[in-house]
């Protein structure tokens, strides 16, 4: 897992609409990177649905929410539509899992990222992280708010 | 709004409480959730405890859920909260507005009042209050059960 205080590795990935999005685009704002295993899995569906419900409160605190998995942008689009969410979903698709690896979230052999939260501050530094014990469980939204500066 | 971790709030006078048994179970439930509908039948069948119903609608999963929870609040204002909850869980396929009006009529609710109150800010805030307390307690899915603090 990437260390708190480290420079967050920059990346450029495609979102659900196939548009390129870079971490640098968020410079000057806080962004919460939500690494998750895969679109359409039951736990990922619950996780992103719950986080969607607290997006207004995250926005109030100046935090942007971004999901990242190894799925293709087309899968992200379908997943977003199925869940009825508008959270940006980025495709760590090719080279597969490269960004998850850079953040220490990739599970070698499983081909997926673990369920990991990384808060990147306005200066592009890692401000807080959380890693689930297993991909089968996800941190409640309260855990995110616990990790935000008060 | 602070959504950081906190235990569930103690049972208060405006909680929706059903039953008279000694044990008290707090249930965070989504009126659009099939798992909740299944669990609800079993929960209410156990007569040895009280059930406290708290709202936890997850709109992105169940788009009608917020409207159903506000309708339950409006029914509650006329003393029929659990009757509407039972009705919604017993028949999950008919939850559009005309179906809500039918249900309200069957329950003997004053329809105009029900209509106004189910769309009111007070109902929205009441539902949201429960939802936020569930978030703070770490609820990640429904139904979520807690022993009453």
Image (cartoon, coloured by chain):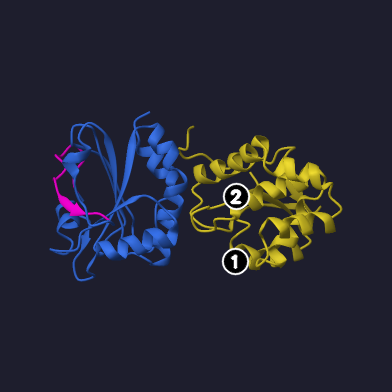
| Residue range corresponding to the magenta coloring | A2-15
Q: Position of residue B139 (x, y in %)?
A: 51, 51
Give the labeled residue for mark 2.
Answer: B66
Q: Position of residue A137 (x, y in %)?
A: 40, 60
Residue A126 tag number: none
Q: Nearer the viewer, mark 1 or mark 2?
A: 2
Which chain does the yellow colour mark? B
Asked where in the image residue B39 lies, by quadrant, the reply is bottom right
User: Which subunit holds the residue at mark 2?
Assistant: B
Q: What color was chain A assigned in the picture?
A: blue
Could you tell me which residue is drawn at 64 percent across and 48 percent down? Answer: B54
Q: Position of residue B22 (x, y in %)?
A: 77, 52
Could you tell me which residue is drawn at 33 percent across and 60 percent down? Answer: A77
Could you tell me which residue is drawn at 41 percent across and 53 percent down? Answer: A85
Q: Position of residue A80 (x, y in %)?
A: 38, 58
| Left or right relative to A42: residue A120 | left
Q: Secondary structure at mark 1?
A: helix
Give the labeled residue for mark 1.
Answer: B34
Crowding near the residue tagged with mark 2, few <14, some 14–19, many ≥20 C-alpha atoms within 10 Å: many
| Left or right relative to A101: residue B28 | right
Crowding near the residue tagged with mark 1, few <14, some 14–19, many ≥20 C-alpha atoms within 10 Å: some
- Please say whether residue A7 is one of the residues in the magenta stretch: yes
Residue A55 in view of the camera: yes
Asked where in the image residue A113 lies, by quadrant, the reply is bottom left
User: Which subunit holds the residue at mark 1?
Assistant: B
* Between discs 1 and 2, the one toward the N terminus: 1
């Amino acid at each position: 897992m990437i260390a708190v205080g480290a420079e967050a590795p920059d990346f450029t990935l495609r979102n659900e609409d196939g548009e390129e999005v870079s971490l640098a685009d968020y410079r000057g704002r806080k962004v919460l990177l939500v690494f998750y295993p895969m679109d359409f899995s039951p736990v990922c569906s619950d996780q992103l649905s719950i986080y969607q419900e607290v997006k207004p409160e995250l926005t109030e605190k100046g935090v942007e929410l971004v999901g990242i998995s190894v799925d293709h942008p087309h899968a992200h689009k379908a997943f977003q539509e199925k869940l009825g969410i508008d959270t940006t979903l980025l495709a760590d698709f090719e080279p597969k899992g490269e960004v998850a690896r850079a953040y220490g979230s990739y599970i070698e052999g499983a081909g997926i990222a673990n369920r990991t939260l990384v808060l990147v501050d306005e200066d592009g530094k890692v401000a807080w992280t959380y890693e689930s014990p297993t991909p089968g469980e996800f941190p409640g939204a309260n855990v995110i708010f616990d990790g935000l500066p008060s | 709004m602070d959504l950081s971790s906190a235990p569930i709030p103690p049972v208060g006078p405006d909680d929706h409480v059903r039953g008279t048994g000694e044990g008290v179970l707090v249930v965070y439930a989504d009126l659009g959730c099939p798992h909740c509908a299944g669990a609800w039948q079993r929960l209410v069948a156990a007569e040895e405890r009280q059930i406290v119903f708290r709202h936890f609608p997850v709109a992105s999963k169940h788009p009608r859920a917020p409207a159903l929870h506000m309708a339950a609040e409006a029914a509650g204002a006329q003393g029929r909260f659990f009757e509407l909850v039972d009705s919604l869980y017993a028949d999950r396929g008919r939850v559009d507005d005309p179906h809500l009006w039918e249900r309200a009529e069957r329950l003997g609710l004053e329809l105009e009042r029900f209509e106004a109150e189910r769309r009111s800010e007070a109902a929205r805030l009441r539902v949201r209050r429960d939802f936020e307390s569930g978030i703070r307690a770490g609820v990640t899915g429904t139904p979520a059960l807690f022993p009453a603090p």
